[in-house]
């Protein structure tokens, strides 16, 4: 079991410039991915969605939970697709429930589904979902992100869970992974129905896109990026469709170790999924625009008195996101640093992810 002590030590920080930021955080997928076998139809904004009914996750199916594909609609009218996991031995009682999202550019068949299924094994109803414009969820154009809409996606998942017959709507939580950790904290700050929030290997996507890694982007670099992205809008408007960047997580040699780690998850059988932006595509070129001046964690103190659990790897390049967010949050809050773990270790390494700590936190908080 990893060390669950509260640690606030400052990590060693590698400096990455604005060019690295744009290469990592500003790309997105061009074409919609083909549906896999045995699709079921659903409607989104008047269009038919093809929903996969076969088990196509990157993790094995548990015999301790019941699973079903579900759809629900967010406040902007976008139909989201999720995987609902329920403890098999739940009986007729109403249970606490957790909405699970992330990482940024991933799909529910990857990390969020693993977290959701594992937490369902521990007695929670869980819902892992594809965010708007990605995976099986609706929204056009494809594979674009929004700090506002993707925050709303979490609240839409709470809408769904709170109306489910097996759920106690007064015992609802949120769990966000990687880039959806920041979205999770933002959602809970505004959505008072949520009683507790946990984040794992958390990124603040508005911070990294607007300031670069370790806040290393200069004003000159930021201005140049905004100039380029602003002019790209004319290109997109003239073409009638957004331009997409090169495929994500492909290695050419000489990359920073954390980029190698991303490749080793998303581009190998360990975590590859054909609908994942990070595995099989890229973001729109203009994707960073709405993140550049809309800080997600402005109101993090307003989560209090509801508890927050931050979990991060000791050796993760992203560790400073959780540590500074922890410092900015009000009590009650906990910070767990997992010894020896890097950023992507907390995506899928079940011997490393402190699931018992997550279960204890939500068990006490919900």
Image (tube, rainbow, N blue to C red):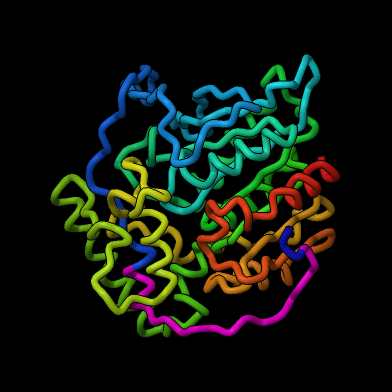
- For residue 334, what is the image quadrant? bottom right
On the rendered structure, is 86 left or right of 35?
Answer: right
What range of the chain is rendered magenta?
4-23
Q: Is residue 283 something one can see in this rendering?
A: yes
Residue 179 lies, in percent from the top left, at 51, 57
On the rendered structure, is 135 left or right of 194?
Answer: left
- Residue 2, placed above or below residue 48: below
- Residue 327, placed above or below residue 203: below
Q: Is 293 within the magenta?
A: no
Q: Residue at x 76, y 32 (%)?
A: 96
Residue 166 lies, in percent from the top left, at 72, 20
Outermost residue on the top side: it is: 92
Q: Residue at x 39, y 69 (%)?
A: 259
- For residue 32, what is the image quadrant? top left
Residue 204 lies, in percent from the top left, at 55, 63
- Residue 172, placed above or below residue 364: above
Along the line of sight, the residue nearer the viewer: 277 or 223: 277
Q: Which residue is drawn at 23% across and 54% down?
A: 244
Q: How many labels does the image show?
A: 0
Q: Main secondary structure of the magenta part?
A: loop
- For residue 115, what is the image quadrant? top right
Q: Which residue is drawn at 56% across and 24% down?
A: 67
Along the line of sight, the residue nearer the viewer: 33 or 352: 352
Q: Is 12 within the magenta?
A: yes
- The quadrant in which the N terminus is found is bottom right
On the rendered structure, is 329 left or right of 285?
Answer: right
């Amino acid at each position: 079991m990893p060390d669950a002590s509260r640690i606030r030590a400052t990590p060693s920080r590698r400096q990455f410039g604005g060019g690295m930021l744009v290469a990592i955080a500003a790309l997105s997928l061009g074409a919609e991915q083909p549906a896999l076998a045995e699709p079921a139809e659903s409607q989104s904004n008047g269009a038919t969605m093809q929903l996969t009914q076969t088990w196509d996750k990157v993790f094995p199916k548990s015999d301790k939970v019941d699973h079903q594909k579900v759809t629900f609609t967010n406040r902007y009218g976008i139909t989201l697709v999720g995987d609902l996991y329920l403890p098999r031995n739940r009986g007729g009682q109403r249970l606490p429930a957790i909405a699970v999202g992330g990482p940024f550019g991933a799909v529910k068949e990857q990390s969020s589904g693993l977290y959701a299924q594992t937490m369902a094994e521990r007695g929670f109803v869980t819902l892992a979902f594809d965010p708007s414009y990605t995976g099986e969820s609706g929204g056009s154009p494809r594979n674009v992100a929004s700090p506002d809409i993707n925050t709303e996606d979490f609240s839409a998942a709470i809408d769904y869970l709170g109306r489910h017959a097996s759920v106690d709507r007064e015992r609802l939580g949120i769990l966000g992974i990687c880039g959806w950790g920041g979205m999770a904290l933002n959602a809970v700050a505004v959505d008072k129905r949520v009683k507790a929030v946990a984040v794992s290997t958390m990124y603040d996507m508005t911070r990294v896109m607007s300031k670069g890694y370790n806040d290393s982007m200069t004003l000159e670099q930021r201005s140049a990026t905004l100039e380029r992205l602003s002019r790209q809008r004319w290109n997109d408007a003239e073409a009638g469709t957004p331009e997409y960047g090169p495929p994500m997580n492909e290695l050419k040699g000489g990359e920073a170790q954390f980029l190698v780690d991303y490749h080793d998850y998303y581009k190998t059988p360990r975590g590859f999924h054909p609908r994942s932006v990070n595995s099989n595509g890229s973001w729109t070129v203009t994707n960073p625009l709405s993140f550049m001046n809309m800080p997600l964690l402005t109101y993090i103190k307003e989560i209090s008195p509801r508890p927050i659990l931050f979990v991060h790897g000791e050796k993760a390049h992203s560790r400073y996101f959780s540590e500074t967010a922890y410092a900015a949050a009000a009590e009650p809050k906990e910070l767990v640093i997992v010894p020896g773990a890097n950023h992507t270790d907390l995506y899928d390494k079940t011997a490393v992810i402190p699931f018992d700590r997550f279960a204890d936190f939500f068990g006490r908080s919900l």
